Image (cartoon, helix red, strand yellow):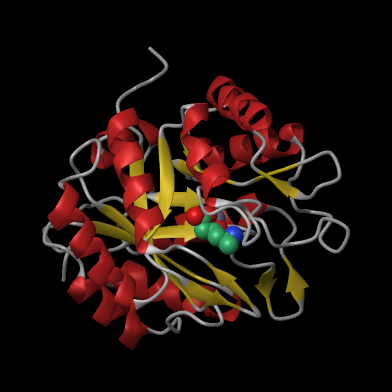
């Protein structure tokens, strides 16, 4: 399988996605929505073993926003407070315009998400038509922002092959994907589907996986067993165990790190993750 051990990476890249655009702060008080809450969360998650933070931000009323000033402040504050790789979401919320999603790159993140196709998203649609995908990809190349290819379905793997074939390698030269599994409307979060998706990835690509909601643990165990990397966080799951809500993002990172160590693939520190993903040091 592409990017698998043995012979692959002896460490596990852990990404935390602490907020997302969907959960409601009034229903989920532990969700980090202010800049302070986000930076504190990021620090705790770094201490627990995360190397990348996948960032969605909220406005003063805790609603999702792509406000450029807030995004720039967020990038600066995360860089000031942590060594984490700052990956801004270009997916935003399902209601965000393509123009606003492209403008996310103006905030100068280390990395960004880039979803490779449209997917039903519960009762909504997460729109990523080909013209938008290729505009965003070319912008990442121009701005030297390293994309993480988000794959919600097997057809999106085909779009990734097309993208690389038509426009060449990404900034940094390395292809890293994130399999987002278990979204209602996307690929299911099970090991059979995980294996099929990984087998279809471009040669030399590495990958993380995350399972939404109840698929979190099967996907986590499957990814570790197959030599993949991990994404966890309250964007993807709000339950730590049956009937027990997540109390803080860091406990999801702590669990992932413990299982990674148990699998003899300890968490990858941020400096190694930069080299692994082809991201230069922007702090120096
Ligand atoms: N909030 C979803 C509609 C991404 O961050 O790039 C899209 C999403 C993917 O979360
Ligand atoms: Zn996201």
Corner quadrant of residue 126: bottom right
Question: Is residue 75 shown left or right of residue 221?
Answer: right
Does residue 269 appear in this view? yes
Residue 150 or 271: which is nearer the viewer?
Answer: 150
Vertical order, 244 against 99 (above or below): below
Does residue 232 appear in this view? no
What residue is shown at x 54% (from left), y 38% (from top)?
47
Question: Is residue 14 shown left or right of residue 99?
Answer: left
What residue is shown at x 75% (from left), y 58% (from top)?
247
What residue is shown at x 25% (from left), y 62% (from top)?
160
Q: Position of residue 136 (x, y in %)?
A: 38, 46
Count of number-bearing discs: 0
Q: Position of residue 222 (x, y in %)?
A: 36, 76
Q: Position of residue 259 (x, y in %)?
A: 44, 63
Residue 199 or 273: which is nearer the viewer?
Answer: 199
Taking the image as four quarters, which one is ligand 1 found in? bottom right
Q: Position of residue 52 (x, y in %)?
A: 45, 42
What residue is shown at x 40% (from left), y 38% (from top)?
111
* Furthest residue in direction bottom, as rendered: 192
Vertical order, 78 against 230 (above or below): above
Question: Is residue 192 shown left or right of residue 54?
Answer: left
Q: Could you tell me which quadrant the N terminus lies in?
A: bottom left
Vertical order, 72 against 212 (above or below): above
Q: Could you tell me which quadrant the C terminus lies in?
A: top left
């Amino acid at each position: 399988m592409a990017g698998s051990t043995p012979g692959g990476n002896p460490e596990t890249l852990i990404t935390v996605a602490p907020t997302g655009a969907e959960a409601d702060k009034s229903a989920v008080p532990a969700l980090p929505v202010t800049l302070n809450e986000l930076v504190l969360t990021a620090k705790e998650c770094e201490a627990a073993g995360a190397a990348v933070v996948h960032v969605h931000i909220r406005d003063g009323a805790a609603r999702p926003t792509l406000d450029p000033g807030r995004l720039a402040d967020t990038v600066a504050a995360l860089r000031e407070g942590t060594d984490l790789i700052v990956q801004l979401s270009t997916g935003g919320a399902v209601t965000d315009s393509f123009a606003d999603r492209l403008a996310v790159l103006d905030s100068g993140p280390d990395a960004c998400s880039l979803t490779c196709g449209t997917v039903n998203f519960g009762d909504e649609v997460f729109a990523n038509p080909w013209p938008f995908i290729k505009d965003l990809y070319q912008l990442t190349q121009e701005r030297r922002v390293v994309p993480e290819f988000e794959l919600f379905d097997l057809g999106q793997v085909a779009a990734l092959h097309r993208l690389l074939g038509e426009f060449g390698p990404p900034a940094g030269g390395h292809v890293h994907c994130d399999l987002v599994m278990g979204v209602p409307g996307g690929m299911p979060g099970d090991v059979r589907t995980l294996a099929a998706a990984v087998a279809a990835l471009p040669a030399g690509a590495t990958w993380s996986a995350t399972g939404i909601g109840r698929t979190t643990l099967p996907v986590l165990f499957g990814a570790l067993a197959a030599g993949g990397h991990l994404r966890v966080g309250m964007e993807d799951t709000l339950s730590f165990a049956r009937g027990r809500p997540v109390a803080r993002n860091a406990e999801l990172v702590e669990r992932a790190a413990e299982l990674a160590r148990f699998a003899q693939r300890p968490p990858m520190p941020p400096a190694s993750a930069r080299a692994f993903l082809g991201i230069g040091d922007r702090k120096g």
